[in-house]
Image: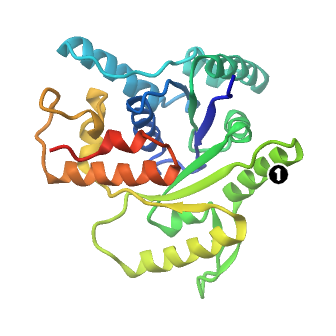
Amino acid sequence: MNQPKVIVVGNEKGGAGKSTLAIHIAVGLLYSGRSVALLDLDLRQRSMARFFDNRKAWMLANGQKLPLPVEPDLGEGKALARAGEEEQLARFEQAFAEARRMADVVLIDTPGGDTVLSRRAHGLADQIVTPMNDSFVDFDLLGQVDPVSLDLIRPSIYSESVWEARKNRAIAGGTPIDWIVVTNRLAVAAARNRERLSDRMKKLSKRIGFRIGPGLRDRVIYRELFPFGLTVADLSNEIRPVAVSLAHVAARQEMRSLMMALGLEGAEAAFDVTE
């Protein structure tokens, strides 16, 4: 049997939009006909898990049928967060093994911090997707810049963590980990700061070997659909919990470009503009 693809959405900084990306990647894959197993390692927040709980509740209340992932049991999040690292790893390994048996793709959402589970997940990844805000504050986790010239000095802590995961994979004789970084929550207007940031991103990508993917605008639609457990891929004549506008069309196009950049064949069709 073919092994499922393992996608890890990771960044050690909170607030970068990891769960937003993970949710949309999952839904795009589901609409492509793949089975998807989810592991939400943000044990306290559990935003991705809560999104799909919202989705089930909305479907039941509105008599709609939408694609759903499978969710191997990690246990109660807050209780697991209080457990020791050995117990956490044991529970994760059990859930991960179950996920691999259940699905074509295992999608793992990680917390905004360095944890034993996040490190383990990165080591298992076939593809790492790292969102970062359009800011040198977020870039600082990837690379350090000179405070006077803004010249790139060296890779930073998160880049070093991914490098370690890739090195261990190579030592073990596994397939290389594909790492893609996307600039998230882009402001609508172009700015000098973005040009500077983009230039440093390109230099760092060549130095440590990640790909740069298309980013997402800071759009209200991504937030306002969350309570319903819906994405722009789900909107149709029958499913319209919010008023549809041109911003929704633009959001679909953004997500379509992202799916194509990730190489998730078929997933981009979920975000085709149909109206």
Q: Furthest-bottom residue in view?
A: 149
Badge 1: few (under 14), some or many (20 or more) residues near its Cα, within 10 Å? some
Q: Mark 1 points at which residue?
A: 167
Q: In this view, does 214 lie above or below 75?
A: below
Q: Which residue is drawn at 57% across and 71% down?
A: 201
Residue 181 lies, in percent from the top left, at 55, 58
Residue pictured at 65% horizontal, 51% vertical: 178
What residue sits 29% from the left and 37% below the top? Answer: 233
Q: Residue 13 or 183: which is nearer the viewer?
A: 183
> In the structure shown, which secondary structural element does the residue marked by tag 1 occupy?
helix
Q: Taking 233 as reference, is 84 above or below it?
A: above
Q: Is residue 86 above or below residue 225?
A: above
Q: Quadrant of the N terminus?
A: top right
Judge left or right: residue 250 versus residue 129: left
Please state the horizontal and vertical placement of residue 24, each as a whole percent of the image.
Answer: 40, 39
Quick one: quadrant of the C terminus?
Answer: top left
Colouring convention used in this rendered image of the protein: rainbow
Residue 254 x %, y %? 34, 54
Residue 98: x percent and y percent? 65, 16
Q: Quadrant of residue 3?
A: top right
How many tags in the picture? 1
At 64% from the left and 61% from the top, the residue drawn is 210
The answer to whether 83 appears left or right of 252 in the picture is right
Three-letter amino acid code at the position of disc 1: Lys
